Amino acid sequence: MARRTAAYSAIPLAVVLAVTACGPSHHGAAPPPSSAHRTTASAGTPDPTTPPPATPSATTRPPRTNASPSTPAGTPHAAPCRSGQLRWTLTRLDAKPGHKPSTALLTATNTAARPCALHGYPYLEAHVGKGPAVWTEPGTKARIRLLLRHGRPVVFPLTYRAVPDRHGYCAIPTDFDPVIDVRPPHPARGDYGTPVRMTDTRGRPVRPVFCDTIRIGPPRQR
């Protein structure tokens, strides 16, 4: 009977010792990280599911906007052509203007020793004093960038109406002899143009008749 009582007394003691041994280890463990801690810790770590930012590539670089496809490679820089170094001629191609659009050729020749740059269309105006007038407008949006060397002419074709319309209207009446002035593109300050006379293909003076806007086309060099 004494042995049985001693055995029963040993059981609660073993339970108490087991609880005492586990208690300090459990209370000393670190608590699980809060959600704020997890968010802060993961902010500096890249997400493997997010691709890295794209870097510029030479193949996707936009083209240079100051390049001109009409400028030959290796063209030297030159100052703009000025009226003082250009000789202009205006040649009417059709001997008897009819109802079809008349045509003429405006030619510019560089008389200076150095080349000059002709970037754009020349401006031609026919007028009677301060009264009626007509002028040139480009017939195309093509960019013009030319290098005129000494003695090398460049030719611009002109197209215009040289007869009154069905109501008898003509911008410059046909009985007037208008004055024609020509200016290079980007003229210098105070440049009011160079007077030029119209001739036929044999060089004989003819009276110009302009009834509407003069269309000027892309040039060609001779």
Image (cartoon, rainbow, N blue to C red):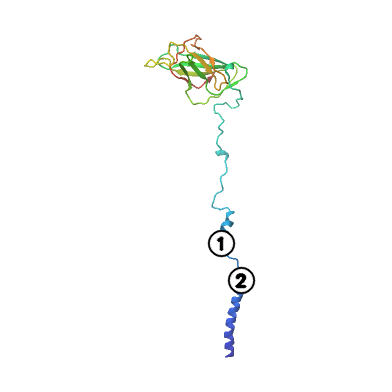
Mark 1, Cα crowd under 10 Å, few <14 / some 14-19 / many 20+, is few
Q: Quadrant of residue 101?
A: top left
The quadrant of the rendering that contains the N terminus is bottom right
**What residue occupies the far top of the structure in this picture?**
204
**Residue 67 x/y as whole percent:** 56, 30
**Residue 142 x/y as whole percent:** 50, 26
Element under disc 1: loop
Q: Which residue is mark 2?
A: 25
Q: In the displayed structure, does residue 17 sit left or right of residue 198?
A: right
Q: Quadrant of residue 76?
A: top right
**What residue occupies the far right of the structure in this picture?**
113
Label 1 is placed on what type of residue?
Answer: Ser
Element under disc 2: helix
CA gap between label 1 and label 2 equals 21 Å
**What residue occupies the far bottom of the structure in this picture?**
1
Q: Which residue is mark 1?
A: 34
The reply to whether discs 1 and 2 touch (Cβ–Cβ < 8 Å) is no
Q: Residue at 60% of width from left, 70% of height from top?
A: 27
Of residues 217 and 41, the one drawn nearer to the viewer in this rendering? 41
Residue 131's label in the rendered image is: none
Q: Quadrant of residue 37?
A: bottom right
The quadrant of the rendering that contains the C terminus is top right
Mark 2, Cα crowd under 10 Å, few <14 / some 14-19 / many 20+, is few
Which numbered disc, 1 or 2, marks the residue closer to the eye? 1
